[in-house]
Amino acid sequence: MAIYRFNTNSGKVGSAIKHYNYINGKDKYGYKEKEIAYSYDFIPPNIDSYNFWKCADNNEPVNGRTYREFKLTLPHEFSLEENIQLVNEFIEKELGKDYYYSIVIHDKESSEKGINNIHAHLMFSQRKIDNIERTPEQFFRKYNRYNPHKGGAKKESSWNKKEKLMELRQSWEDVLNKHLEAKNLEKVSCKSLKEQRKEALEKGDFAKAEFCNREAVHINGYLLHKDLNKMELEELEQLNNYLLNKEILLKAKESLIEARKKEFIKESFIEINSQLETIVIPSKENYSFNEYEALEENINILEREKFSIEFSLKNESIELETIKVMNEPYYNLLIEKENLIENFEANNFKDSDLFLEKLSNLNNKLESIPNPKTLPEFENIKLQITNELNNRLERITLNQTLFKNQLKEIRKNINDSDFAKNKLEKEFNNNFKRIINAKFDIHSLERKITTYSKNLERENLTKMALNIYSKGTYYNLNNRYSKIKNEITRLEPVVIYKAGANEEENIKNSKRLAQLIKEKENVEKEMEEFNSKYNNKNSLIKISFIKENLEEKYRKALAKSIMERKILRLELETLQNKIFATSLTKEQANSLISKYQNNSQYKEMLINKNNIIIDSLKNLINSKKLEELTLNKMSKGKYFNVIKEYNSLATNYDSLTSQINSLKFYEIEKRVSMNKERKELKEKLENLSNEYKIIKEFSSKPEFIEVYKSIKENIQNSLNMISKKNKVLQTDLYKNRSKENIASSLAYELVSPSLSKITKEIDYSSISSENFEKSSGGGSENLFTKDYDPDEWKRKKNMFEKGFSL
């Protein structure tokens, strides 16, 4: 989604040409040239843009300002042409032909994966064009109000006023929103987040209010590159706030986009209340089952939305939602406490003392924050949320009524003898798929909850904060120390008892052990230096600050995951009650499972194919072939053609020589003809050999290295791209294999009715990947198709374990 950012600054004398070079990637800023997507200059016709801004530096009065700049963040959802059109419309509106300017659009990768940082630098002179003919030098001189022809152009003082800045911010918002609205994208606002949140709450737009419930994301650029150890406490605070709020912004964006999707589904299905009676169902003589199915899917989407709202309308849920809107940290602690007690009651806590300690810590934190329920505005906000949810529920119910009426009308006109059978089969398949997805999502959330809970332990928070503050040095030292220690433990008995295969190996092991002991001593010295460097008052204060930020971040993530799991568990229970009323044949079960198997096999095939390409590219980068590719490019393809033609002619030459040697002594004419042909071949081979030598000499040319590096870089980029694709495929394969095992387990239960009563009592929320393996194994081997090999999954499982990592 688009973001609003409008920054302005002005440059003093001497800074104009530097800034012009910076935004255009010139001179010492050449490294930025790749970022430039578009540039345009509106300047006097008798001078180029570089010298125009140089004149500003050389002729502007000493205490004057040479330029003003607007920095505008552009929507990454727009194409370059659309962003150019957007910027030009704003320029036409605010500058027109009254001011000289340079506009440059930069497009570069951002820290957010898959989203580019595209923005515009609009640099202009505040001197207004007055149609008086002046040289560029005179244009920037002091204005002469008594005789304008003798002085420079007049500066508009309004550009420096706060009121003008507010107008410009609003103007950019208006132009940007006009273009966003045309593409059905979320609008932006120039108002502060606090003002936006207040307005959203007044309108009952709680998704927007939640999105605005954060600090703005901005920071002085130099802090992103400054050494942490050289930062003052205030600077470190700014950096941590930036990183934390940036993470919050990304999560807030995801939540708002998800909320808007739900609203779009809700609003796009039907026009409600007053328009309900005016909707006419299109009249057709015959309808297909697919049309019926599509309409029924809309009802199912609404049913899921209705389920979520009804859950939220329960008194406890409404109160929690109100607390979340009013004070999110308090809400996060409440949810964490609820999860802690739930785990203890489920006997997941073996150590009751540890449970009591954690519960006491949470209670102390809760007591240190004012309870939102005690505040006077609590009931009003609760009522607003309740009314909004009830309105949404009413609209969904109306929508469902209309869709059901449409279904009845369509059903009357469907000429399908197997309609009832098809309907039940489709409903069953949908529920089967939803159960698998719900179980998989619950399992994923369980892993997240476990990880977040471990991260929130005091010792782990301290370690993470120390590692962040030391830029990864803490973990690096610990990992190196553990690795060396483990290898010493393994090697010591081998050396002591001389357990090597022979004397030579024993000597080798002894040397390696001595080397490891020395490495261990060196790492221990580094650890002592590390402790002395970071175990001081200034560092400890900064580490403590990072620790608090991490704790807030993980509590928020934990609370979100717990609530998502709760809703999924309720949905899963409802779905299981529906589906366990049905029994399956083995053939039907195989059919359901085979869809997941086929998908896994397809992804596996793509991974293997990519691995072959990756190996080829790796060999290419590290081989002599790269030099040949360079020579071929420099010779415009002649290098490989020469080699190919030479090899072909050489084969013919050898063949001809062999034939000549086998001729009878009396075949004189034939011998003469063939010798002539061989001579011609020899001449061609010599010419090709000379041409080859000329091309080989390209390797000594200065540009050879540059072309070589360029080809190597392109191959490396291709290698990186395919490797990234493979990582995504491996994650997808792991997920699909997990779902395949869930499907096998579920299908087995449905095939074996005698087990249904037992399996219904299983708590699926606690199923792990190990449970999945057991479910797909003993007792159900006949359920699988011949192509399926459960052991293959077990062998490969560890390979994809990273797919679930956070």
Image (cartoon, rainbow, N blue to C red):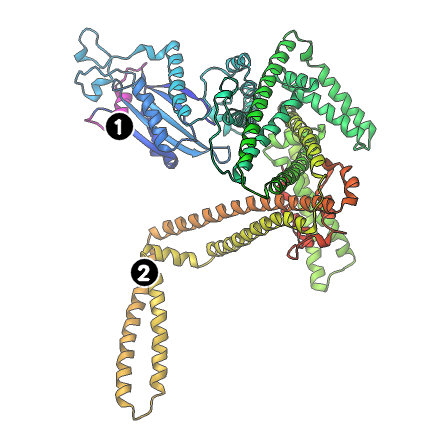
Please state which of the two labelled residues, at mark 2 or mark 1, is closer to the viewer.
2
Q: Nearer the viewer, residue 593 or 719?
A: 593
Residue 138: horizontal and vertical position, in percent? 21, 18
Above or below residue 267? Residue 367 is above
Would you name the residue on which mark 2 appears? Answer: 638
Query: What is the secondary structure assignment of the residue under circle 2?
Result: helix
Q: Position of residue 543 (x, y in %)?
A: 63, 26
Check if residue 173 falls in the magenta segment.
no
Q: Which residues are magenta?
A: 45-64
The answer to whether residue 715 is above or below residue 330 is: below
Q: Residue at x 60, y 21 (%)?
A: 393
Name the residue tied to disc 1: 49
- Measure how far apart labels 2 and 1 are at the Cα level: 43 Å
Q: Is residue 480 above or below residue 98?
A: below
Give the quarter of the image for residue 206. top right
Residue 175, image quadrant = top left
Residue depicted at x 51% and y 35%: 113
